[in-house]
Image: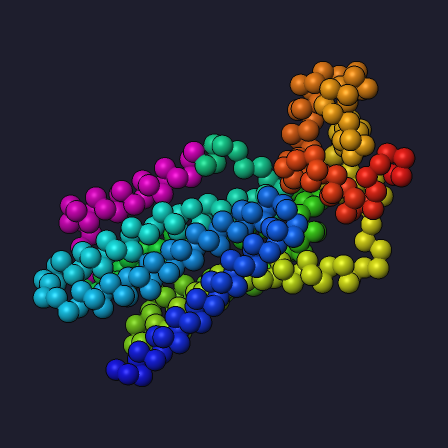
Amino acid sequence: MQIEYIFYIATFIISAGFAVIGIMSSYQLYQTHQKTIFQILLYQQIFIFSFFIYGIWGNMAIREIISDFSLSTELANKLAIFIPVIGIPFMVVSWFMLLRFGFILNGYKTSKGFAISYFPIFVSIVFTLALLLQKGIFQIPVNPDIFIIRVIVVLNFAVHFIFTTSFFKPKRNAPLIKETGLNKQLVLLYFVGVILYSGALSFYDLWGFISTCISIVLLFGVSIFIPVVLKINLYLQPKQSANPNLNFNEFCKMYEISKREAEIVLEICSGLSNKAISEKLFITIQTVKDHNHRIFTKTNVKSRVQLSNLVREKTGTTSKGDS
């Protein structure tokens, strides 16, 4: 028993370390590059590890506490399912962020309709499962932990399958894939890791506490793959090329910016306001705002300052005269 506790303590320390690495790597990526894509990744890491800490370690701690009480088998089984299910919203949000991250990285837009349809689907799945259990169509198995873990594993696998397939059909010249270096080979490697920890979790009690500890370490370790790889890729990126600068036309081609949008970009970088741009280019202010929105979406920035910084970073210039 003492050896078992030592293993669990060591596993908790390792998994907590992985969680810190994943969240801090994502946070540093966002702080350094100030891109929406990294903000999404940061949220994904926060929500996924919130679920892991609560759903796994919180559940184990509560189960250890209630083991000292004389509970009926039926009540203990219901608690075993109810406790982790409370944390499911964290997992569902993390899946949403992962899919959004993958879609944006591959040049696809995520409309409001995506969010509107995504969350009701998962609510329907949970409601249907609960109804089937209540009606007795699905019986709570002897080991309820295995049941709830396998349900989550199946849903998690489906989400990661969709995430991975998006990298096999990216939009033409998806700039963020080139910037981050997160290509389909690396994503496939990540997906293999998902398959490994899915199998380990599905049979986590095969060798008692040893297999449980192994499956938890695999789960936490694979989950930090993307932020760690991105951080390494972007750290090494400047060293891979002695002259990383593009000319302005190459910049526009990379981000699929049209000729009129290119004119707007140059004027924004020159410091002109929307009103000044509309007067100079003989277009309405609303048209300028519409162009701004499309430019921000294509370049994955949120403000004129971030756009100017991106142009300077990629081309080495912010002014029309220097381009």
Q: Say if 148 sits above or below 39 in the image.
A: below
In the displayed structure, does residue 206 sit left or right of residue 142?
A: right
Q: Residue at x 78, y 38 (%)?
A: 252
In the displayed structure, does residue 27 sit left or right of residue 251?
A: left
Taking depth in this image into account, of 268 and 117 the one nearest to the observer is 268
Q: Residue 71: x, y in percent? A: 11, 63
Magenta stretch? 116-141
In the displayed structure, does residue 270 sit left or right of residue 234?
A: right
Asked if residue 177 can be seen in this view, the reply is no
Query: How is the structure coloured here?
Result: rainbow
Asked if residue 93 can be seen in this view, the reply is yes
Q: Which residue is drawn at 16% across and 61% down?
A: 76
Q: Is residue 131 magenta?
A: yes
Q: Residue 84: x, y in percent? A: 29, 56
Quadrant in the rendering for residue 29: bottom right
Dominant secondary structure (helix, strand or loop) of the stretch shown in magenta: helix
The quarter of the rendered structure image containing the C terminus is: top right
Q: Residue 281: x, y in percent? A: 80, 20
Q: Does the magenta stretch include residue 214?
A: no
Q: Say if 269 sits above or below 73 in the image.
A: above
How many marks can you see? 0
Quadrant in the rendering for residue 215: bottom left
The extreme right residue here reads 321
Q: Residue at x 56, y 55 (%)?
A: 26
Q: Which residue is drawn at 35% across and 55% down?
A: 152
The quarter of the rendered structure image containing the N terminus is: bottom left
